[in-house]
Amino acid sequence: MTDMPPGGEPNEAPRDIADIPPDGRRREPVFNLAPVVLALIGLCAAIHLVRAEFLSGEQDFALVLRLAFIPIRYTGGYSVDVWSFVSPLSYSLLHGGVVHLLVNCVWLAAFGSPLAYRIGPARFLLFWAATALGAVALHFALYPHSTTPLVGASGAISGMMGAAARFAFRIDRSAGRPAFTGPILGIADVLRSRQAVAFLAVWMAINVAVGFGFGAPEDGQVAWEAHIGGLIVGFFAIRLLDRPQAPPPEPADPAGAA
């Protein structure tokens, strides 16, 4: 956008000057998603598009049967196959509907990009896998004989929220991309952070309310226990998966060099 003075033509300025904000800081794009987050969003969307537009009902059922996490697969006396090992991770790429997909993509963009920029793409994918497994582990412990397929990235995203709490949601945007910043806080420090405690309390209250049927979708159940499993794993796993950070610069000697 250019400024136009009253009754005149738009002000002209050389491109290399006009594109620099007055304070000399680089503008941050409105949507500045980490590439690995954008790839995961694209993958989830592509899978859902294929299911909705190109697969028959029978084919989609067969795909969900293989890629969704179904507890009875492990407790019902069925033979172990490759899907027994794939589904505890692949379930996180499936979604129950367009709304489910869109909501998860929004939360993934909000919490995933600062985390991915902090720890890097490889560690981020490991974090995704760990929290997705943590989510199904708690779900399986509570419902070992369930026949209901579990799908969705919510468990992994909940893990990202748990990691965000360890930074008290502090985000550094000075490099032109959002990244969680500062040291990982200890549990006592997190509990002293009003912002972290308030967020976690509201998040827990919403999940418990949904667990009792308030606000749950009419066409399916919300596996809120899996959300808690993902959040707990993410809260603790970030310390193991955090990328080594450069030490802060030492303050200059006010007296100067001798």
Image (spheres, helix red, strand yellow):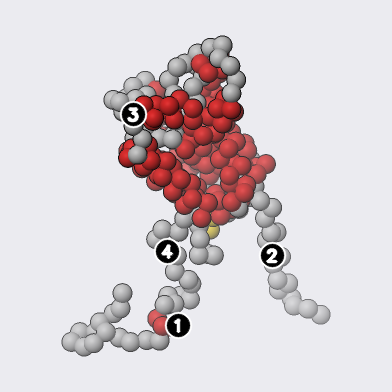
Task: Name the image quarter holding residue 219.
Answer: top left
Amino acid type of the residue that numbered disc 4 sits on in the rendered structure: Pro
The kind of secondary structure element at disc 2 is: loop
Q: In the image as oriented, which residue stretches furthest toward the right?
A: 258
The reply to whether dot 4 and dot 3 touch (C-beta < 8 Å) is: no
Label whose residue precedes the other's in the sequence (2 or 3):
3
Can residue 96 be seen in the rendering of this structure? yes
Q: Position of residue 154 (x, y in %)?
A: 45, 35
Q: Which of the two discs, 4 and 2, sits closer to the camera? A: 4
Amino acid type of the residue that numbered disc 2 sits on in the rendered structure: Pro
Q: Which residue is mark 1?
A: 16
Label 4 – label 3 distance at C-alpha: 41 Å
Residue closest to the eye, 241 or 79: 79
Residue closest to the eye, 202 or 125: 125
Amino acid type of the residue that numbered disc 1 sits on in the rendered structure: Asp
Residue at 30% x, 78% y is: 2
Label whose residue precedes the other's in the sequence (2 or 1):
1
Label 1 – label 4 distance at C-alpha: 17 Å
Q: Which residue is mark 3?
A: 57
Q: Which residue is mark 4?
A: 29
